[in-house]
Amino acid sequence: MRGRAVVLTLLFLLSACSRHTPPVGKWEGTYDTAETMVAARVEIDSAGAIRISAPNAEGIGDKEDARAAMRDTLATGLATGWDEVTPRVMEFDGHTFRKPRGIAPQMFWSDPQKKMVLVVYIGKQPAIHIPMRGVDDFSENPWPQ
């Protein structure tokens, strides 16, 4: 009986120690192929509330004028819609963010490298992993110049 109490106490202590605080900051990134474009922002506040926006477009093709116009459209939509993004709570294990009780990863964080990767799911396509860059303030146009 005493051994069981010790094991339960150890399990409790381990679970208390396993709670991880998500990183605080802002990140933005893009994904750009002929099939799919995504412009994304992530913000995590000190309370752990997470705001994510990732407007996307599919089937743009390879004509540069159409691609440039779509980059502008996505950047504008990201900037103008940001104030309407509702904060959400996610489970965070120190590396992976998931929706509460969810299975699919939503983001990955590498603390030693201070790198964030957003995972975007569009239809039946494979998950898209978007490397995010940390920013002090969001830019009007997240596309690399």
Image (cartoon, helix red, strand yellow):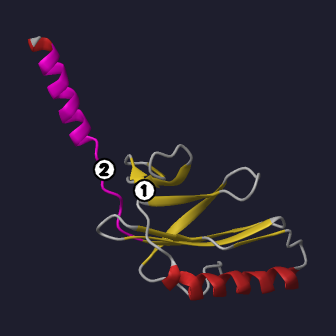
Is 43 on the left-hand or right-hand side of 126?
left
> Dots 1 and 2: beta carbons under 8 Å?
no
SS at badge 2: loop
**Which of disc 2 and disc 1 is earlier in sequence?**
2
Q: Position of residue 15 (x, y in %)?
A: 25, 37
Q: Amino acid at mark 2?
A: His
Seen from the viewer's position, the closer of residues 97 and 64 is 97
Please tell me how many numbered marks the rendered image carries: 2
Is 80 on the left-hand or right-hand side of 98?
right
Q: Amino acid at mark 1?
A: Met
Q: Against 2, is 73 above or below?
A: below
Seen from the viewer's position, the closer of residues 58 and 34 is 58
Q: Is residue 68 magenta?
A: no
Is 120 on the left-hand or right-hand side of 57?
left
Residue under pointer 1: 90
Q: Position of residue 11 (x, y in %)?
A: 22, 28
Residue under pointer 2: 20
Residue at x 37%, y 48% (from the top left corner)? 94
SS at badge 1: loop
Q: Which residues are magenta?
A: 4-25
Screen quadrant of the C terminus: bottom right
Residue at x 85%, y 73% (from the top left corner)? 60
Q: Residues within 10 Å of mark 1 (few under 14, many from 20)?
A: some
Q: Position of residue 122 (x, y in %)?
A: 71, 59
Q: Is residue 12 magenta?
A: yes
Q: Which corner quadrant of the image does residue 109 belong to? A: bottom left
Residue at x 67%, y 52% (from the top left corner)? 127
How far apart are the alpha carbons under marks 1 and 2?
A: 11 Å
In front: label 1 or label 2 = 1
Q: Position of residue 4 (x, y in %)?
A: 16, 15
Is 77 on the left-hand or right-hand side of 23?
right
